Image (cartoon, rainbow, N blue to C red):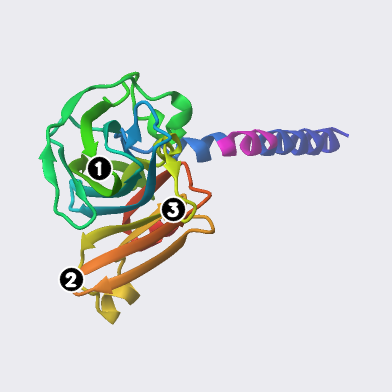
Amino acid sequence: MATSRRSTDRLAGALALAVLLVAAAPGRARANIRAPQVTPRAPSGALAPSPPSPQVRVLGETLTFTCDAAACDVAAAYRVSASAPADLTLAFILPTAERVMAQVGTASGSGAAIPVTVGPSEPLHDDDVPREERMGYADHPPPVYQARFTAPVTAGENRIAVTYRQPLGQYERDHGYLKKGRFLDFFRYEIWPLDEWQRARDFQVQGAVVITRPAPSWWQRTFHHVRSIGCRGMEPPARTLLEQRGDQLRFQFQLSEPLPRRLWCFMGDDDLVSKP
């Protein structure tokens, strides 16, 4: 009888231990996955007229991000049609107070330089910022700035171009307590300000993200990770093409109506870019 009772007690103890191990396992698994490191950055955005003018339509935009390890040189050019001469007040957001250059001219001309004023802007609403970026704020959202200038347009087609430098943020991926993570560089570009314009029916954004990357060898592609580019917000009818041109890798895109609200682009190891 005593032997049977001891066997029962041992069985009960083993079952209790098993239950405790199962209950603790998820906690231990979660504990082994620390929070990723994030360097947040405010976005830049498309031009918006203030106030909107029904006499002016935007016909199209070309947009190029030429990126190095720290930032992207951004060049945005707009084709704008006006029914009569007008002075347009234009504004856009950006993540830095560095110099912004603007030019305004006819469709066939190079354009004249226009003075631009850059100053602090109101912070973005949390709904406009991905949750993972907000985790890196530490109660201090990254600063947002606004660039403003007046563009004198003539009757007919005009070209308005702006250039500026946009710092990159970083996301950590493939990380753990005992494992050093890898980082994705990223930037965001807000497209929703284009809603303030009267847009042509065939309006499109023709864009590209460009990095310096010599064409990798078969060995590199097979046994190593190579640097690549990818963007979110590219659902149909958007068209994309990733191609090597000399020592440059180019992610080209074409956006048509309905336009996405934003682009969120990543650069880093190809396996991380495919699932940012």
Identify the mark at residue 247; answer none if there is no mark. 2
**Looking at numbered disc 2 in the image, what kind of residue is underneath it?**
Asp
State the CA–CA distance, disc 2 to disc 3.
Answer: 31 Å
Q: Which range is magenta?
A: 19-26
Percent position of residue 83, x then y: 36, 42
Q: Answer left or right for 153 relative to 38.
A: left
Which residue in the rendered view is the most extreme toward the right?
A: 1
Q: Quadrant of residue 273?
A: bottom left
**Looking at numbered disc 3 in the image, what kind of residue is underneath it?**
Phe
Identify the mark at residue 256; answer none if there is no mark. none
| SS under mark 3 | loop
Q: Answer left or right for 220 relative to 70.
A: right
Q: Residue at horizontal 34%, vertical 27%?
A: 50
Residue 176: tell me if it is visible: no
Q: Residue at horizontal 41%, vertical 40%?
A: 194
Mark 1 or 2, nearer chain start: 1
Most common secondary structure along the magenta stretch: helix
State the CA–CA distance, disc 1 to disc 3.
Answer: 20 Å
Is there a contact, CB below 8 Å, between mark 2 and mark 3? Answer: no
Q: Which residue is mark 3?
A: 203
Percent position of residue 106, x then y: 21, 50
Percent position of residue 150, x then y: 21, 31
State the CA–CA distance, disc 1 to disc 2.
Answer: 40 Å
| SS under mark 2 | loop
- Of the pair 72 and 117, the residue shown nearer to us: 117
**Looking at numbered disc 1 in the image, what kind of residue is underneath it?**
Thr
Which residue in the rendered view is the most extreme toward the bottom?
A: 218
Residue mark closest to the camera, 1 vs 3: 1
